[in-house]
Each structure stands twice: as C-alpha cells, then as structure tokens.
Image (tube, rainbow, N blue to C red):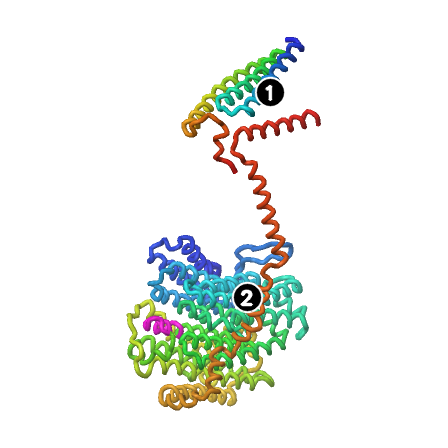
Amino acid sequence: MLSLLAFIPAFPLLGFAILFVTAGLLPKRWITTIGVGSVGISAFLALIVMFAFLGAPQPYTKVVWTWIAVSSFTPHIGFYLDALSGLMMLVITFVSFLIHLYSAEFMSTDEGYNRYFAYMNLFVASMLVLVLADNLLFLYLGWEGVGLCSYLLIGFWYRDPANGLAARKAFIVTRVGDTAMAIGLFVLLTNLGTLDIQPLMQQAVVHWPVGSALPIAAAALLLGGALGKSAQLPLQTWLPDAMAGPTPVSALIHAATMVTAGVYLIARTHVLYDLAPPVQTAVAVIGALTLLLAGFSALNQTDLKRILAYSTISQIGYMFLALGVGAWSAAIFHFMTHAFFKALLFLSAGVVVQHLGEEHDIFRMGGLRQRLPLAFWSFLIGSISLAALPLIDAGFYSKDLILWEAWSDGALGPWLWAAGLFGALLTAIYIFRAVFVVFFGPVRLEPTGLTGWRIAIPLVVLSILALTGGFVEIPSYLGNVPAFSGLMRSALPGPRVAAAGSSLEIMLSVIAAVVAILGVCIAYIAFRRRPAFLEALVRSPSSLALQHFWETDWGFDWLYDRTLVRPFLWIARIDQGDVIDRFYSGLASLSRATYRQLSETETGRVRRYAAGITAGSIVLIAILVFA
Amino acid sequence: MSVVLMQHALFLAMVLFALGTIGVLMRRNLIVMLMSVEIMLNAAGLAFIAAGSRWGQADGQVMFILILALAAAEVAVGLALILRLYQRLGTLDADAADKMRG
C-alpha cells in the first residue's frame, strides 16, 4: 500500500500534461473530469497511504529512479513518508480537491478554463513533490514549481497589466528568498556531502557543534527561502498583491500550498535549527513581528480579499513563532487547522464577490446574511475558527497550543506570548469587522445568481473541518486527547517543556479565550452598534495618516520602491548603451556589411556562374597537378 | 594506337573542350550555349575513346556511349527550358534571365 506513494504527485502531473497538450481542444466535461479527478484520485490515494502508514508509523522511502549521478552526488527522484510529510500530503490533497471542485463551478464561464485547471494541477503536483521529496534538491524542484505556478495563476487574467505586475512581483520577491535557499543548499552539500534529508540531518548532528558558524549560516539561508515563500517579514509584500488571481487560486495559495512551504521546510530541517539557537530565536521574533504588523494592516483594509491575505501573513506568523520556540508539532497543527478555515474563508468570500459582480470593497457590501445564507454561515464559521473563539472550533486548540509553548520558552517567552495574545485580539477584531460590515446592516448591493452543489459541498465540508479539525489535539485539562502530537512525535521532537496540565496553562488559556471574545465585542461595538463613535475617533488627521500607513503595509512597498526598484531602474536607464552592447552591435553591423558585399556577386547571370565554376575547376586541377 | 596518335587525339580534345568552354562563357544566345556544351561533352568523349584505344580497354567506349545518352537527355531538358524561357521573355539572351539577382 505504501508503494502507492509515488503515484500521489504523479496523478496531478498527468492531469497537467493532458490538459497542457490538448490545449482546450477537449470537451469541457472532460476538462473538468481530468482537472478535478486527478486531484481527487490523489486525495484518495493519500488517504489509503496514510491508513497504511498509521498501522505502522515507520518512515518509508520510495526511490523511483536516480535523477543525476555525478560521482558521489546522486540525488534521487525519491519520496519520503513520515508523520510530518504524510500529514502535509493529506491536507494538501484533500483541501486542493475541495478547491478544485469549487473551481469547476466558479470558473465555469471563464474562457481560460482549460489553462486554469492545467496550472492548478501543476501547482498541486509541485507542492506534493515539495513535501514528499526525500532530498533537498528534489524539494527545491517542487519549491520552484510552486513559485512558477503562483506566477502563472496570479497573472491568470493577463489582459489587465496590473495582474501581470502582481504576478511578477510575487515571482521576483520570492526569488530573493529562493536565491538564499539555493546558496544554503550549496553550503550543506559542500560541507556535508549529501542532500538526502535524513542522512544530512544525521551528519549535521555528528559534525557540527551547537551554535557553530556553519549550521547558523545554513539555517539562516534556508530561513531566507522560507521567509520569501511564506511571506514573512521582510519579504511579505508580494502576498496582498497576489489577490489579483481568481479567488480559488488565493484559497489554494493561502490554505494548502505555497505559503506553508516555508513552515514545512523549517520543520523538515528542524535539526539545523536546533543546532543554531540564534537563528531559531530569529524565527520566533520574525513570526511575532509579522503577526502583529499584518494584524494592524488587516485592520485597515477595505478589500475583502486583502483582509484575508493579511490574515494569512499573520497566521503564518503564528506558525513561525511556534517553530521558533521549538513547538514543532504545534506549528504543523496550526498549519492544518489554518488550511481548513482559510480555505473556507476564501471560498466563501469568493461566493460573495462573485454574486456581487466582482465587488471587493466591504463598505459597499452589507446585509448579506439573509441573501447569501450559505456564504454567511461558512464565512462565520471560518471567522470563528480564525479568531480562535474558545472550545467550539479548530483554531482555538492550535493557537492555544502555540501560545502556551511560546510562554514556556525561556526569558523571551512571555514577550512572544504577549505578542501572540495581542495578535489574537487584532485577529478577532479585523475578521469580525469584515463579518459585521459584509453580512449585517442594510443591503447595499443586491446579490445575483445561484450557488450550485459544486460550490456548496466544499463549503460544507470545510465548515465541518474548521469546527472539528482541532479535536485531534485537546489539552490535558479539557479531556486530554494527544493524538496529533503523539503522531508527530515520530517525526519531530516534542516540546522542550513538559506541558503538564498546570493551573498556569489553564489561566493562560482562559486569558486567550477572553481576549478573543473581547475582540469580537470590540468589533461588534465599533462596526455594528456604535459606528458613529468610531467615525469620530478616526476622523482626526493623525489617525488618518496612521490608518494609511497601516493600510499600505507599514510602508514596505514604498521603502522597497525607493531603495531597490528606483535605483535599479535609474542604473538601467543610464546604462542603456553599455560597452558590452557596443561589441555585439559592432559584430552585427560587420556581418551586415559583409552580407552586402557578397550579395553583389549574385548577378543572376548564368554565364557568370559558369565562369565561376570554370575558374574554380581550373584552380583545383592546378593544385592537384602542381602540388 | 600509338602514343603519338593518342597525344594528337588528346590535344584535339583539349582544343575542342576549350572552344566549348569559351562558347558557353562568351556567347549570350542560349541555343549556341547549349551547342557549346555539346562540344565540351564530345571533347570529353573523344578523350575517353582515345584512352580506351591506347590501352585496348572497352571501358572508354562504354563511357562514350554513356556520354551520348547523357547528352541526348540533356538536350531534351535543355531545349524544353529554352523554349519556356523564350515564351516567357521573348528573347534568347541568357543575360535577360537574371531575376535571381541578389
């Protein structure tokens, strides 16, 4: 059963190949069947493989063939299954399948239907390669494939230049991180002689003492790659613009693929981070800063999808925070619950946006509670889970675990905990601001159109998962179900402190729960009960300036534009006719002149040609005779 | 055939070949150019005959028959081309057909 592992990425890849080669010539029915079915089959296979794996949770490696063989450097096309990659695989295939099913209806009137499913299948295949690869080079292939597909899908509606710009921005900004990661791979290869992940980790422990320079360099460079892909400070600027793509693409990028790649990479190479404590601390601090910054930005967005984009940055910040304090399984747990509720939020937001005729501004929406009940309930459930309201949803259990383990992390712990707690308050405020503005109050735009079963099923399934997905890991004081962390322990080290069911843990949980509820209340008062109060507060000029500052992502875009983009364009402009170009244009004009000379001999007169042949023959014979 | 006789024959072949070549290169009339080519072919044929006779080999005559057949085919194709050119250009001047000038 486990040997089916290699087929899991193969099916979406096959789907991509068929759709790509036929280029839309197939009937639409077939395109849907191939596009959705390939991911469905791979989700089914993932389920079978995981059942077989859970029977005997031993790491399993399936080498399909040798990719490159250069003396001792022989990376394989090989797949590695353990609790970590298995869980990622299951979540990715399952959530992707639901998103594909949703897309079958959502994109049904789009002229690029075939192209869309081809890219989506390639995206899923790349992401599966990324999480299942048994060596870092193969992982890097998936890593770059994910980057490519995000570029293609963000710029999917390529006729609008703004979308192309957003796509290029995503590609170039993540490329900064990818370059750092490639250098990191070279550091690992030259120093440890292999890129196969498991031997590499064993070698690293043997050869590198804790805190020495090489593991710090390697971990920092890999972290660079992770920051780019996961949109963390300071490379987060691409993600809000990535909303230019179709909404299901945003769901796929944010929930199942792409942005969680960085989290996976750090968890996969956690041994390196254990060897490099300063880098690990940096991971935690970056995570904490990012979740706060993105929280403030989300609070001031008026575009529904951009609110969700900043909330993704913020939630990935929680995962980085967890990784940074060594709460490996908590980070992966939050990845799983986040995949459920973020996919749900994006898909229900997609329904809202589509029914209002591509209207993104939340202040032009309102009162959709009765008009779009399905979208309302799924968005509400997603918001509850995102805001981590206590007990009833998945997000609470994962966020609670992260906060508790952050608290327990030495001297810095309480600060990280406080950042996470404040972030939770912001999360509850900004997401319920969206809920109250979009779904309550007077109807401002009348929705049109009907919702079909292919959109309804993913919403219902994801709603159930967003509520119940957290019950696989319940803290000891509430019933003690350690199923998730028990499974993860076979792949990742447990928390550094024994998380006993102390009164402290209960107290911190209660504080977090109260803060989340407080956030919802603030949102209720400010955006539902007393909008006038808020109006008066935000009218002052300094407050408007601050709002603008937060809305534009703390000026990061402005900063990068001034320090990087403009100087680069300036240099490009003054260096238009550079020296090297002179050489090549000289070469071109030389060959053009020679061509003119030679074409003079082409008179078109047969006697000239005959004379040429005669003269040539005479010369040849003369050489033969006299030489 | 004696050596001297063969030298004479080869000298004649050379003169004929040179005349033919000059005819092709100097004359502009297509018919004359074709005839000049025939002269060159016959010069080559004469050289074969002379050499075959000198060494008592049949090969020389075989080659001459081959050249005859070749010349016949060449004239058929050549005359057809000349006819088409004449219909198209209204002249037999070879230099008038210079559409392929570079």
Chain of residue at mark 1: B
Identified at 53% across, 68% down, the residue is A173
Asked whether A510 or A241 is in front, the reply is A241
Magenta part of the chain: A345-359
> How far apart are labels 1 and 2 at the CA level?
74 Å
- The reply to whether dot 1 and dot 2 touch (C-beta < 8 Å) is no
Identified at 41% across, 62% down, the residue is A159
Q: Position of residue A5 (x, y in %)?
A: 48, 61
Residue beneath disc 1: B18
Residue type at mark 2 is Arg
User: In the drawing, does residue A111 fall left or right of residue A510?
Assistant: left
Q: Position of residue A234 (x, y in %)?
A: 55, 75
Query: Would you place residue A85 above or below residue A481 in this image?
Result: above
User: In the drawing, does residue A193 fall left or right of residue A105?
Assistant: right
Identified at 51% across, 90% down, the residue is A503
Q: For numbered disc 1, what is the local secondary structure?
A: helix
**Residue A564 occupies which quadrant of the picture?**
bottom right
Query: Would you place residue B91 above or below residue A152 in this image?
Result: above
Q: Nearer the viewer, mark 1 or mark 2?
A: 1
Chain of residue at mark 2: A
Residue beneath disc 2: A175
User: In the drawing, does residue A176 fall left or right of residue A627?
Assistant: left
| Quadrant of the rendering where the C terminus of chain A is positioned | top right
